[in-house]
Amino acid sequence: MPASYDALIYDMSIGEERKELARLKEEERIFEIIDTLEIQLQDFIACQRPASKLSPSELESAVKAHLDGRSLDEYGCWVFYPWSGRLVHLLPEDEFKQLRTDRNQYKITEEEQRSLSDKKIGLIGLSVGHAVANSLAMERSFGELRIADFDVLDLSNLNRIRSSVHHIGIPKTELLAREIAELDPYLKVTCYDEGVTEENIDEFIDGLDLIIDECDSIDIKIITREKARAKGIPVIMETSDRGMLDIERYDLDRELPILHGLVEGLRSEDLKGLTNEEKIPYVLPILGLEESSLGLRTSMFEIERSISTWPQLGSDVMVGGGTVANVARRILLGRAVKNGRYYIDMDDMIAEESSPESSGEKASINSKQDIDHERILEQVRSYIAEHPSRSDYTDKFFENLILKARKAPSGGNTQPWLWHYQGDTLFLFLDTRLPETLYNFMHMGSWIAFGAAAENIELTARNAHMKTSMTQHHFDADASFPLAVSFSFSKMTDETRQEDELFEYIDQRITNRLNQNLRPLPEKIDTAIQERVHATFSGITDVRFITEPEKKALIKETLSISDKLMMMNPKGHQDLYGELAWEKDFSETEGINVHSLGLTPLEMAGMRIAKDESVMSFIRKIDGGDRFSEMNHKSVDASAAFGLFTVKEFDAATYFKLGKAIQDAWLYTTSQEVAFHPMSGILFLIQRAEQEGKRFFSDAEISQIEKCKSLIKEAFDLDEGTIPAFMFRIYVTADRPVPSNRRPLDQITIKHDHTR
C-alpha cells in the first residue's frame, strides 16, 4: 500500500496501468483533472530545437509527429495526488527530466545531471532542511532523498517553512514529500517520520553519498558524524544565522575531528544520561553563539521570557537552503570543496552605514593614567615634616605588611590602594586611576577596603610584636592620589605582646560564591559575630541577621530588582564588566575572575554575550532583560542567613571603621569554615540615588531603588535613621573557588628611589 505522501503514477504505455487509471476514475476520488500535456510537448520540442524559431503551425505539426499517431490521452503519464484529489497529465519520465532541467544547462552539464540522478542524500531536520530539500529537488541534485523529522507542522513554523495553514498538524516529512512529488513525481523520497534515532541510524545512512544535518539534538549530531566518518560520508550543516555553514569532508579524510574539533574528544556515549543543562558546554561551540547575530545573541536572554525559543527568519532559511544545495551539488560532483566553517552573512556583505553613537567602548580598570609620584611624595614629605620618624624599619617588614594588606577584600577586587613607606610609617593612598563606579559612591567602597586592609595590617604587626597607630586623612572627592591612612609602628613591651588567632586566616579568607555541596551552619555563629562586633566596634556599627524564609524572600526580591537594574543601566553594565576578569588560568591581577563565580556553562555563555553593549542596547530597546533578575536566585536559596552591618553616619570615618569590623567578622567566619559572600551593591545605589538623584538613573530606576530600600528595611526591621551599609550572606559549602589574584608589590608600592 502506498504511503500517504506517495503520488500514484500511471504510465499510458503500459496496458495494465491504463486499466488502473480507469478504475481510479470510477472511485470518485478525483476532484480535479489538470491536462497541460500539449503545452508541455510544445515546450519540450522547442527546447530540443533551440536554434529553430518554430511558428505555431510548425510547432503543432512537430507535436503530431512526436506523438507518432498516438492521441494525447495515450501519451505520457497520469499522476494522481491522493492528498489533493488532483490528477495531472505529464510527459514521460525521461522527457519530463530533460525539460525540467533544461535551464540548468550549462551550470550543470548533462553528464553532471546524470551523475546527480544516481546520488543518495540523507537530510535530518526539516526547518532549514525544508528549504534545503526544495532547493535540491528544484535542481534535481539527487536520485533519492531520505528525510527525517519526528515533528508535525505548527503555525509558528510558517515564518520559515513554505506551507499552508490547512497543513497544520501534519508530519513535516509527509508535507515535504508531498511538495517534492508535486514538483517532480519521478524523484524518490523516503520518509523517516520518527526522525533519526540510535535504532534506525544505520539503516538511514546506509548507501548515502552525503548527509545534511539540520537537527536540534546534540546526541544525533555526534552519532551521525561518528557513523559518517566511519563510512567516509561528507556532512553539511547550516544554522540559518549569519549564514553559518559547516562542511566536514569525511569522504576525503576519515581522521578529521568531529565538528572541526570544537567538541574535542566528545563521543556519543559521553552524552548518555546527561541533562540538557549538562549538554550545554558541547552545544554552544557547535552553534558558535558568541559569533552569532545580534538578534540571536539577544534572544538567549529572552527565551521563555518574551519569546518561546530561538528565532529564525524565512529569508535566512531560504538563503541557507540555497547555500547548502549549492555546496551539496559540488561535493556530489567531486569538486574540491574545502572542509571548514563558513559564513555567508548578508548583513555583513550588504552592510548598513554605522551609527556614530554607541561605539560599545567602555572603561576598564586597566586603562589608567600614570601614577603621579611627585604628588604622592609631596604628601609624604609634608607628613614627615610634622611627624618625624623615631625608628627606621626594614623593607622586609613593610613589604610583609603590604602583602597582607593587599589580601583585604575590595569591591570588584579593584584594589584601590597605593603604598609608600619611610622610617616607621606606612602610607596608604587612594589610587585615583580607577574609574568612578555606581557602587563606589563618594569612595565609600574604597574606605571599606581601606578599613579591611588596616585590620590586616594591625593583625600582621601584632603577630610581629609591633603596635600599630593609625591616622585617617580626609580628602576632597576630586583629589589626585590623596593620602588616606598613615600607619606608624612601635615595638610592644613584653607585657603588651599578644598575637591574634585570626592572623593565620588572612591568607585563607576568600569570597565564596559557590552554591553546591551545602552543609549546616554552625550553631550560634550569628550570635558570635554580633558579640565580636559589639565588643570592638560598638557605637560605630551594628550587625543583624535574618534566617526566616519570608524575610529571605524579601532579599531575593531586592536582588532581583537591583541585579536587573545594574545590567540594564548603561553605567551599571559598564561598571560590572569593568570589574570582571576572564582568563581561565586566573592570570589577571585585578578584577573578579568569572570562573570563580560557580556559573553553569549556559550562564557563562550568557555573561560573555551580555558583555557586548550592542546586545544590551538591543535588550533595552525591546524592554527585555527579565532573566537578569535571576542572577542571584541560587545564591539566595543556598544561603543559611543574611547579615547586615548598619551605621548611623554616611561618612569616610565611619566606613573606614566599618571596613575593619567587616574584615574581623569575615576572618572569624573563615576560621569557622563558614562562607562569607558580600551582596551590598544595592546599598550604595540607595545612597547615590538619594544624594545625586537622576545623575545616572531614570525616574523608573529611582523608583526601583526606593522599593529596594523599603524591602531591606522590612526584612531587617530597620529604624528610621539607621543606614544599611553592608549586606552579606553566610553558609557552609565543601567547595572552595580559585581566589582572585592581587596586583604585585611593584605595581602598588611607590619605592624610595622616587624621592630622588
Image (cartoon, rainbow, N blue to C red):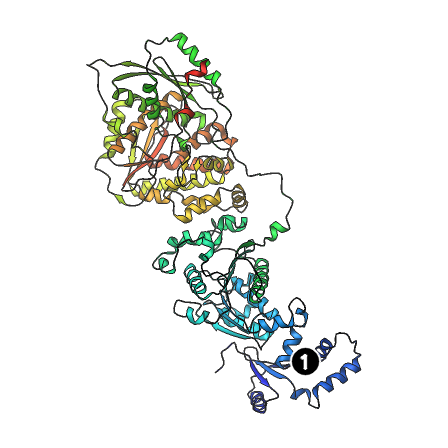
Q: Secondary structure at mark 1?
A: loop
The residue type indicated by label 1 comes to Thr
Residue 709 in picture, x, y percent from top left:
40, 34
Residue 556 in picture, x, y percent from top left:
37, 42
Q: Quadrant of residue 731?
A: top left
Q: Is residue 270 above or below residue 96?
A: above
Q: Quadrant of residue 321?
A: bottom right
Q: Quadrant of residue 49?
A: bottom right
**Which of 189/177 is in front?**
189
Q: Is residue 520 above or below residue 406?
A: below
Horizontal arrangement in the rendering, residue 293 relative to residue 471 (left or right): right
Asked if residue 304 shows in the view, the reply is no
Image point (61%, 87%), residue name = 12
Asked if residue 477 shows in the view, the reply is yes
Q: Residues within 10 Å of mark 1 (few under 14, many from 20)?
A: few
Reading the image, the residue beneath label 1 is 36
**Which of 562/324 is in front?**
324
Image point (41%, 47%), residue name = 603
Residue 628 in picture, x, y percent from top left:
44, 44
